[in-house]
Amino acid sequence: TTTTTTTTGPVLRTLYNGTGIYSSLAVNAEGHAHVAFRDDRSGEMKLALCQDVQCTRAAVQTVDSHGNYCSVKFDPHSNLARIGYAPHSTLAVAYCENALCDSVTVTAIDSPTYGAVYVSMALDPTSGAPRVAYHVPGHAIDLQLAVCGDMRCTTRTVRVVDSVGNVGQLPSLALSSAQLVRIAYNDETNLALKLALCADVSCSSSTLRTIDQVGAGGTYSSLAVDSTDRPIIAYNDNGSGSLKVAVCSNAACSSFIVNAVPGASGGRYNSIALSSPGDLPLLSFCDSGVPAAILAYCHNLACTNVTLATMGSCTNTQTAIALYNDRARISYSDGQRSWIKLYVE
């Protein structure tokens, strides 16, 4: 069943009135949203920092003179932002040294021969050490994972998680309660959506699951892990163009169910968060059929019963969702000017 409402809020903020794309969103312990994004005119990696819970004021800092495909998280100890991104087709993590992020230290993580794109990062909740998934294009066309040994990533191990065919595009990384890496990603060769489950913290080995290989398979995936360690994946069905949700039956994802989200006519550039308690998915995405940025409230785990809310027009670029006190914050690029917008419940 579907209930559809149209709204511009509760509050819709403009964070940046330049050409912003590939936004990533995180909310700190005080409830202040931070949005990392690329300025597509200058090529700069930027960070918009809300100064209060409702984001009535925001500052924008330049993190690096070049950057792409970012993923922002907050360090569990300092509550400062960390941004995984791809400057000049390498892989790096930028460390904000203060709350305003006007002082930044950049640590280079990897420099693959054929570059690095499509970055997704999580931080170990105890040590703050980054875990970064990324795609290596060109000749290698692999899914790779950088496992940092400490918060500053002074030591690291780089794993090739999947290298069979053209794999690893658009990865989405999340951690289990035991800090084991899970990565949803696209297998372009087999037109499939896959899930990698690391066997240990360093991901010395992993199990690869094929989640969807029907028709044109799945892309633009976003991954969350629920309170029982079950992976839940939102993704776009390339064949039908619909938004789907795959729910694993257990932590090993030995079986799963897949459902199309009713009322969603397009599922690209999606992002997923889970309510607490309840583990009910909330999804943001650009619906190409409208076209608009949409928030889907799932009333059951399988997302077969949803309420859809329209936030505003969006371009074909990433949306990102995070929750604060179970209230959604969503960043996206406005469809008229490519301004960076923030929806605040």
Image (tube, helix red, strand yellow):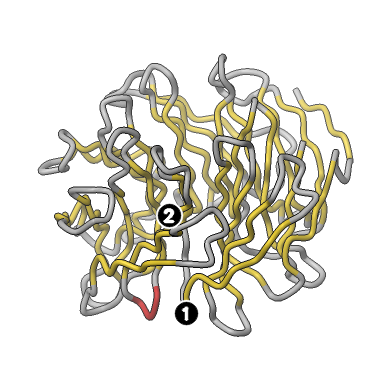
Residues 31 and 23: in front is 31
Look at the image and tell me in which quarter the C terminus lies.
top right
Q: Which mark is residue 120?
A: none
Q: Position of residue 143 (x, y in %)?
A: 27, 58
Q: Residue at x 39, y 30 (%)?
A: 231
Classed neighbour count for the residue bearing mark 2: other residues with Cα under 10 Å, few (<14), some (14–19), many (≥20): many
Residue extending farthest to the left is 204
Disc 1 secondary structure class: loop
Q: Which mark is residue 82?
A: 2
Q: Position of residue 23 (x, y in %)?
A: 59, 59
Q: Residue at x 87, y 34 (%)?
A: 5
Q: Position of residue 66 (x, y in %)?
A: 47, 79
Q: Is residue 156 above or below residue 136?
A: above
Q: Residue type at mark 1?
A: His
Classed neighbour count for the residue bearing mark 1: other residues with Cα under 10 Å, few (<14), some (14–19), many (≥20): some
Q: Nearer the viewer, mark 2 or mark 1?
A: 2
Residue designated by label 1: 66
